[in-house]
Image (cartoon, grey):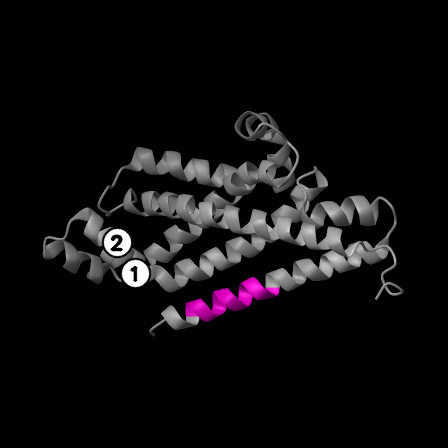
Amino acid sequence: MDKLFPNVDWAEMALASWETIYMTLIAAFATCILGLVLGLLLFMTGKGNLWENKSLNTIIGAFVNIFRSIPFIILIILLLPFTKFIVGTILGANAALPALIIGAAPFYGRMVEIALREIDKGVIEASRAMGASTSTIIFKVLIPESMPALVSGITVTTIALVGYTAMAGVVGAGGLGNLAYLEGFQRSNNDVTLVATVLILVIVFILQFIGDRITARLDKR
């Protein structure tokens, strides 16, 4: 192994892998919550829905579209002062979390809205006719009915977050992206870059496999 990859420090590679997994999972958890809230607000304030409010829907939609459209590497740079204020540093895995969450939550929020729109309107109307409260409709109808699409969406978003962590590594966030850039690219150690890339692919394949299995179990069609 050492002959094939002479420049790879396996302990350092393991640490970088853990940092990538840590950033991805923490950011995915926060993104799932914030994105679900954004998606519900977008759907509920839309035309013909329970909280119909054109002005609020426009504001939330604009927020989602703006942050969804900013290239992630630029977003990281724009959020450096905010990250410094929140975390106290702009380096390391924790420093990448604000940008990861702010970059991914609007993306997932739009996917949540799309999933909710696919629910049969008749189911919602029937719940309203039976006197169900708004909270009951949200937690007993909307979320359960759209769960396969929600899980599929968070799977796609989590995989995108793996790519975001690699970009965040270029500006010192740690993880496999940081290792591939500093130890691989800048020092022309192609074996380091190759191993880091393969490990990122392995993480992506595992996340996709888990997401697909959960979606298949939830999908009752």
Q: Residue at x 62, y 61 (%)?
A: 203
Q: Quadrant of the C terminus?
A: bottom left
Residue denoted by label 1 = 144
**What's the magenta bit mostly, secondary-structure-wise?**
helix
Residue 185 horizontal side relative to residue 134, left or right: right
Along the viewing direction, whichever of 163 and 107 lies nearer the viewer? 163
3D distance between C-alphas at marks 2 and 1:
7 Å
Residue 137 horizontal side relative to residue 79, left or right: left
Residue 11: % across, % down: 74, 54
**Can you tell which quarter of the image residue 159 is in?**
bottom right
Q: Residue at x 40, y 58 (%)?
A: 150
**Total tally of numbered discs in the picture:** 2
**Can you tell which quarter of the image residue 5 is in?**
bottom right
Residue denoted by label 2 = 139
Crowd tier of the residue under label 2, counting other residues whose Cα lies within 10 Å: few below 14, some 14–19, many 20 or above: few
Three-letter amino acid code of the residue under disc 2: Phe
Q: Is any atom of residue 197 visible in this view?
A: yes
Residue 51: % across, % down: 24, 41
**Can you tell which quarter of the image residue 127 is in?**
bottom left
Q: Which residues are magenta?
A: 205-215
Q: Secondary structure at mark 2?
A: helix
